[in-house]
Every structure is written in C-alpha cells, then in structure tokens.
C-alpha cells in the first residue's frame, strides 16, 4: 500500500453473497454463519487494522432482531461500513412478506 501511495483499503467478503443464497432456506444457519464469519474477521484483522485496512462485516436481514444485534456488535468494535447482499430481503416462511418486495397488485414490478 505504501509503494502504491494508498492511504487505506476496504476489504469486502464477496463469497458471503453466495453463502447467504445457499443457506436462505435455513434462517438459523444464515444468522449463525455470518455471526461466526464476523467474529473470525474481527479476531483475525479487526475492522480498522492500523487505521488503514478496513474489513467489512456482513449483515443478513433474514432475522431483523439478529441483524440489529450484529450491527450494534460491529459498531462497538469500530466497523466503518458493512456489507449486505444486493438483493431483496429474504424473509423466513413465517413472515408475511419481504419489506423490500414490490407489490404486483398495481401491475408494477
């Protein structure tokens, strides 16, 4: 980074996007997997290593209460940004519908 005259870098967990989709039918597994990933990331790098390398914890919205807890945990440990899947929010089967799903009643997607 010094040779390239970079002040800092963001590290993104790109594999996480596919992992969430693969586990989407099992809410508990999704929450547990990303909680474990975030703990490992924090233990290994921290979220602001030497104020130059910023690791990004991953949040899933499949369980809103867990997502809020995870966000608070990450912010308490100096996370500067988070990563979320760039897709509609997946909700467990017991939920009425995703808050991000668009209505088709009006004919609009």
Image: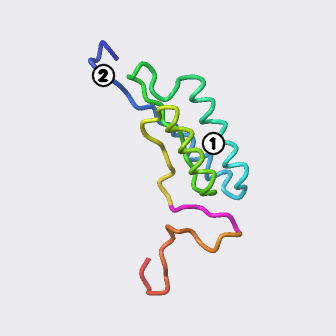
Q: Position of residue 46 (x, y in %)?
A: 52, 25
Name the disc covering residue 34, or none: 1
- For the residue pair 72 and 7, the one nearer the viewer reads as 72
Q: Position of residue 104 (x, y in %)?
A: 49, 82
Quadrant of the drawing holding the C terminus? bottom left
Sooner in the amino-acid sequence: mark 1 or mark 2:
2
Residues at discs 1 and 2 in contact (Cβ within 8 Å): no
**Image point 58% across, 23% down: which residue?**
44
Query: Callout 1: helix, strand or loop?
Result: helix
Q: Position of residue 43 (x, y in %)?
A: 60, 24
Crowding at dot 2, Cα within 10 Å, few <14 / some 14-19 / many 20+, comes out as few
**Outermost residue to the bottom:** 106
- For the residue pair 107 and 77, the one nearer the viewer reads as 77
Q: CA distance from mark 1 to mark 2?
A: 28 Å
Figure check: 18 above or below 98: above
**Outermost residue to the top:** 3
Q: Main secondary structure of the magenta part?
A: loop
- Residue 89 lies in the magenta stretch: yes
The quarter holding residue 1 reads top left
Figure check: 29 above or below 90: above
**Image point 45% across, 26% down: which residue?**
48
Query: Callout 2: helix, strand or loop?
Result: loop
Q: Is residue 2 left or right of residue 19?
A: left
Give, as a single range, the part of the protein colored magenta.
88-93
**Outermost residue to the left:** 5
Q: Position of residue 102 (x, y in %)?
A: 48, 74
- Residue 30 lies in the magenta stretch: no
Name the disc covering residue 7, or none: 2
- For the residue pair 1 and 32, the one nearer the viewer reads as 32
């Amino acid at each position: 980074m010094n040779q390239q005259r970079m002040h800092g870098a963001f590290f993104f967990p790109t594999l996480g996007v596919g992992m969430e989709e693969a586990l989407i039918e099992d809410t508990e597994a999704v929450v547990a997997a990303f909680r474990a990933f975030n703990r490992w990331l924090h233990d290994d790098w921290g979220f602001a290593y030497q104020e130059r390398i910023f690791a990004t914890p991953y949040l899933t919205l499949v369980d809103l209460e867990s997502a809020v807890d995870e966000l608070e945990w990450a912010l308490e440990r100096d996370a500067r940004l988070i990563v979320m899947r760039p897709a509609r929010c997946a909700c467990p089967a017991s939920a009425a519908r995703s808050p991000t799903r668009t209505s088709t009643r009006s004919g609009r997607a």
